[in-house]
Image (tube, grey):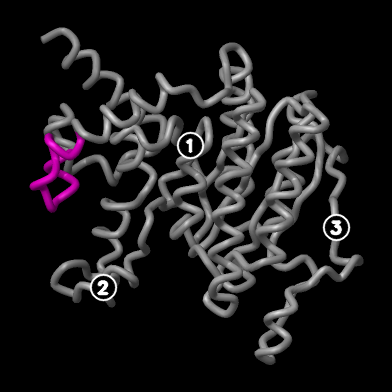
Amino acid sequence: MSSYLEANARERIQRLLDPRSFEEFLPPSERIVSPHLAQLDAPVAFDDGVVIGQGLLNGQRVFAAAQEGGFMGGAVGEVHGAKLVGLLQRAVVERVDAVILLLETGGVRLHEANAGLIAVSEVMRAVLQTRAADIPVIVLIGGSNGCFGGMGIVARCANFIVMSEEGRLAMSGPEVIETASGVEEFDSRDRALVWRTTGGKHRYLLGDCQAIVTDDIDAFRQAATEAVHACRQGSAALTLAALEAEQAMLAARLQDFGTQDEPMEIWRRLGIDNPDIVPMLEATEFTALVERSVDRQGAK
């Protein structure tokens, strides 16, 4: 087994795609770096913390990007965002089978302030334009930094999200919530609470991600392959009907769970009889439990 959590961006993307098929665009040898960091005497990376390129996924031509959590937590700056936008725009021109985004980020790079915010908004628009061209966008989340901030919104703009239990997805990170609202509201040091609230299992139960896998790059590869196939079978485009269904789902969620402050109680209301055991289950056991619970709910 090759741990997705422990791998860096290049290891993930090369292992995810078919052997020796990955071709990097704007590699470190091009030395495309952020102009803002140098002005602040901050360290730079010659790929600005994101690896982009093309390759094959089980024989299908895909474009892929992997954020490097080891550089500024995968945070997005002007160049970082431009690389993602350019990749998505080129995907539309070249009509690839799918775009795979391996996201690991705390959100916008504060060093670059407005430039980073603009970059993230441009990435959102590019994702939606890619979907409008009927090219599916698949997001993978399993890095130690999670996927937060504006890139958390980017993830939810995609067709399909695959997470591991170790992955986390939210708008605001635990430390941000604690800073803004106090430790009484959210204790970022309570790791169990953090994962119950933002982790892969919670997101899967709520329907925010469509697949949960083990911390294994091969498991992510299999799930990504299946996601591309499922999206290509129908339409990858974002329709008005899909937006209205999403809005209805969010309204129902707020009505059903808006007063709850403990994820385990939400899980119980979703039909999980023994929510206490959920954090201890492996991915396959967990999904089997969810399927049994859904079947029971449907039979009532």
Judge left or right: residue 32 versus residue 226. right
Quadrant for the C terminus in the image: top left
Residue at left offset 81%, top offset 37%: 55
Tell me which amino acid carries mark 3.
Leu
Q: Percent position (x, y) of residue 45?
A: 75, 74
SS class of the residue under badge 2? Answer: helix
Tell me which amino acid carries mark 1.
Val
- Highlighted range, magenta: 253-266
Q: Percent position (x, y) of residue 177?
A: 28, 68
Q: Tell me the chief SS of the magenta region.
A: helix
Tag 3 or tag 2, which sits nearer the N-term?
3
In the rendered view, would you say 157 is above or below 111? Answer: above
Q: Percent position (x, y) of residue 19?
A: 83, 37
Near mark 3 (Cα within 10 A), the count class, few <14, some 14-19 or many ≥20, is some
Farthest top residue in view: 299
Judge left or right: residue 146 versus residue 128. left
Contact flag, marks 1 and 2 (Cβ < 8 Å): no
- As drawn, the label of residue 178 is 2
Near mark 1 (Cα within 10 A), the count class, few <14, some 14-19 or many ≥20, is many
* CA gap, disc 1 and disc 3: 31 Å
According to the image, label 1 marks what residue?
213
Whether residue 258 appears in magenta in the rendering, the answer is: yes
